[in-house]
Amino acid sequence: ISYNAHVPGMLLTCSIDKTVALWDTLNPSPKPTPCGSKDMNVGRLHSVSCYPSSPWLLACGGSGNEIAIWDVEGEDSIQNRFGGRTSGDANVATSNIEKEEPDVDFEAVMAAEDDQATSKALEGMNKSKKKKGKKGKKVHKRK
């Protein structure tokens, strides 16, 4: 599930039925309105996201070990519903987001967290081995 940050009310879902679906969350009813779906032909889908610099490019990936991109800019029904909701150029929206948030090296943050998780896992394994090593073997004597 993903929310399109550039198009208010556009919600994306993907499913193991191999489809990406678009939903409108800015409607008068309490439930999101389905706006379209597409079989992406890359197997069961596990992830969907909007391209950061374009509100109309959607990407998904799944069990087919491939990614697929759906350009919804040419889809008339989707443009009729969501086309008026974008505010100017998507690149402008992206640059505004970058100005509001500090520039963080995502890969460095993830690598640091991976290192911490690895260290904790190894530490736990070493403690486990030490505990097993302290146990003495029970000797059974015959009478």
Image (cartoon, rainbow, N blue to C red):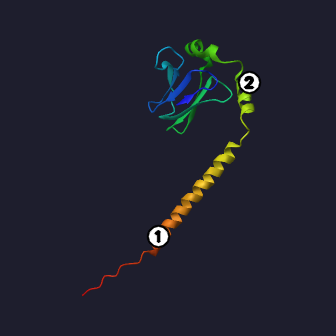
Residue 16: % across, % down: 45, 33
> In which quarter of the view is residue 6 placed?
top right
- Decide: few, some or many residues near mark 1? Use Cα within 10 Å; few <14, some 14-19, many ≥20: few
Asked if the residue under mark 1 is in contact with the one under mark 2, i.e. CB atoms within 8 Å, the reply is no
Q: Amino acid at mark 2?
A: Val
Judged from this view, the residue extending furthest toward the bottom is 143
Residue 116: % across, % down: 61, 55
Q: CA distance from mark 2 to mark 1?
A: 58 Å
Q: Quick one: 35 or 44, which is closer to the camera?
A: 35
- Decide: few, some or many residues near mark 2? Use Cα within 10 Å; few <14, some 14-19, many ≥20: few
Determine the secondary structure under disc 2: helix
Q: Quick one: 135 or 69, which is closer to the camera?
A: 135
Which one is in front in this view, the residue at disc 2 or the one at disc 1?
Answer: 1
Residue 4 visible in the snapshot: yes
Report the label total: 2
Q: Which residue is mark 2?
A: 92
Q: Which residue is mark 1?
A: 131
Q: Residue at x 55, y 61 (%)?
A: 122
Q: Residue at x 48, y 18 (%)?
A: 33
Q: Which dot marks residue 81?
A: none
Residue 5: % across, % down: 62, 26
Tell me the quadrant of the picture where the C terminus can be found: bottom left
